[in-house]
Amino acid sequence: MHKYLPHTEKDIEEMLQVTGAKSLDDLFSSIPKSLRLKDPYNIPSALSDYALTKHMQDLAKKNQELIIFRGAGAYDHFTPSHIKALVSRQEFLTSYTPYQPEVAQGTLQYIFEYQSMVCELTGMDVSNASMYDGSTATAEAMFMAYAQTEQKTLLVSETVHPRIIDVVKTYARYRDLEVVIIPHTSGSTDLSFIESFEKPVMGVLVQNPNYYGIIEDYHGFAEVIHQKGGLFIMNAEGQALSIIKTPGAYDADIAVGDLQSMGVPLSFGGAYIGYLATKQKYVRKMPGRICGITTDVDGKRAFVLTLQAREQHIRRAKANSNICSNQSLLALFVTIYMSTMGKEGLVKVAKESMNGAHYLYKKLLETKKFEPVFNKPFYKEFALRATFDVEKFEKTCLEHGILGPLHIKDHILLFAVTEKRTIEEINQLVELVVNEA
Amino acid sequence: MVKAGLLYSESHEWVEKDGNVGIVGISDHAQHELGSVVFIDLPKVGKVIKKGDAVGAVESVKAASDLYTPISGKIIEINEALENEPEMLNDNPYGAWIFKVEISEPSELDKLLSPEAYKEIAEE
């Protein structure tokens, strides 16, 4: 038997007889020799059950359980135990993409409920069935704005997470679109830059809370952007939306962001989940799939994929997006999280995170080892400028089982606090600053 | 049905000449082939288009098809009523115009098909 293939010599012989080929080489003779693999695969041999278990355990031992004070897009919120139990049901975990509504009502219903809750959370009219992550959802929003306006320039605030900007720029490059950065004035997007920008634009991308954790005031932005004929795109992380002003309330045209912070574990950086929601009038420009509610032939409530942008399947060369799928299992994490936390639970988590962050901010300034960077309202994340050796401090933190803040640049550190951080843990970090920094 | 008094393209659009303006729609044959139309992606007013450009799309329950312009010029008006009632394209294809073009190349009209010539194509 071949290393990883289950076919025996006898199986192969039988199949060759059916095909009429004399040998495997004969079967593959239509593939040019230059394209064929000459050497065996460079893959290690199979391990025994015991050896493999030991190997995985040794790898697992390298993981460190750290107390996390870092965010910058991925947040250490708690995943309630019931989520893991429920998503592990095989009807959810192993189910195929719900193209056949007659056998996929359960999957379709939770997607529908996910969409309904995302609309409520963002204040938008319609949501798709989810995206792969917040960054790619943001890039897809750019494609929507381009399809809608046929203008090639997108303005992006400098306060948007730099990794999101990187992804947007990568997508833009291969569609020949232009990304222009709007400079920030002390942590807030400069509206006057947009007002005085002379070229026509497809739209403007901002983030709230922004990369520095600041809750920006986007009052007046929609008006200016719409006057220029562009779309207002707002990236907002899910958890924050339970307490801050929504993209819908700011009259944003497209809301996008990551939902990792709502029940999805950190998992060393992924898989995560993004959302994309918009106004009713742009529903046809939405990427991905959308689940709708209808009635079946007997008049009973039924769920079904709907408004699937035909061009993604039929006129693919002209497609506005090639995303035809969704991040279903993680959408289920988020759906269960939102429905079992409830509105009050979400607000409670957000407030506890915010209170912890504000307490840490105050305590750190009291150590006199930091200077404020921005004097702006913030949610669970904030930036401070350190007056000490930040690299040495990061090592000290790790030695004490703490993942410290992210060093952005020039001694500016970005701290994040979630509801998981106890007062003792926060005080432990402050003590480290006092004694070791 | 092929309506008299109109010009036709091989891609199944009709054109009605009104002074220097061309009014464009899709033929009865086209709507019949598409089936029930559920959505139309209309072009933008002010856009300058060239004969043969795909300027929009028509979606039906069984297909999605590009909408080509049979004449060059500038789009001066679109039939926005079709956004909410795309089924008018099925019910009354020669009444449901889609867009109006300020004609920039009048000689292109000479190359379009007469109702008789189009009838042969549509009935093939």
Image: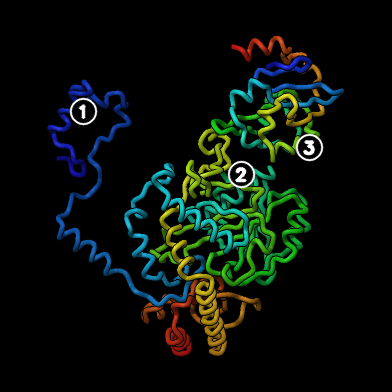
Which residue is disc 1 drawn over? A24
The mark closer to the camera, 1 or 3, is 3
Q: CA distance from mark 1 to mark 3?
A: 62 Å
| Among the 4 quarters of the image, the one containing residue B13 | top right
Task: Please name whichever residue, A1 or A398, is drawn nearer the observer in this view of the structure.
Answer: A1
- Looking at the image, residue B38 lies above or below residue B117: below
Q: Amino acid at mark 2?
A: Arg
Q: CA distance from mark 2 to mark 3?
A: 22 Å
Determine the residue positioned at 61% across, 36% down. Answer: B38
Q: Are marks 2 and 3 on the same chain?
A: no
Q: CA distance from mark 2 to mark 1?
A: 49 Å
Q: Chain of mark 1?
A: A
The mark closer to the camera, 2 or 1, is 2
Q: Chain of mark 3?
A: B
Of helix, strand and loop, which one carries label 1?
helix
Task: Please name whichever residue, A352 or A39, is drawn nearer the observer in this view of the structure.
Answer: A352
Of helix, strand and loop, which one carries label 3?
loop
Mark count? 3
Q: Chain of mark 2?
A: A
Q: Are marks 2 and 3 in contact (CB under 8 Å)?
A: no
In the shown orientation, is residue A202 left or right of residue A23?
A: right
**On residue B46, which mark appears?**
3
Which numbered disc, 2 or 1, marks the residue that appears first in the sequence? Answer: 1
Determine the residue positioned at 57% across, 51% down. Answer: A139
Q: x, y (%) of residue B17? A: 81, 21
Q: x, y (%) of residue A226? A: 74, 54
Determine the residue positioned at 61% across, 23% down. Answer: B32
In the shown orientation, is residue A238 left or right of residue B118?
A: left
| Among the 4 quarters of the image, the one containing residue A25 | top left
Query: Is residue A413 visible from the viewing direction of this image?
Result: no
Which residue is disc 2 drawn over? A284
- Looking at the image, residue A47 lies above or below residue A419: above
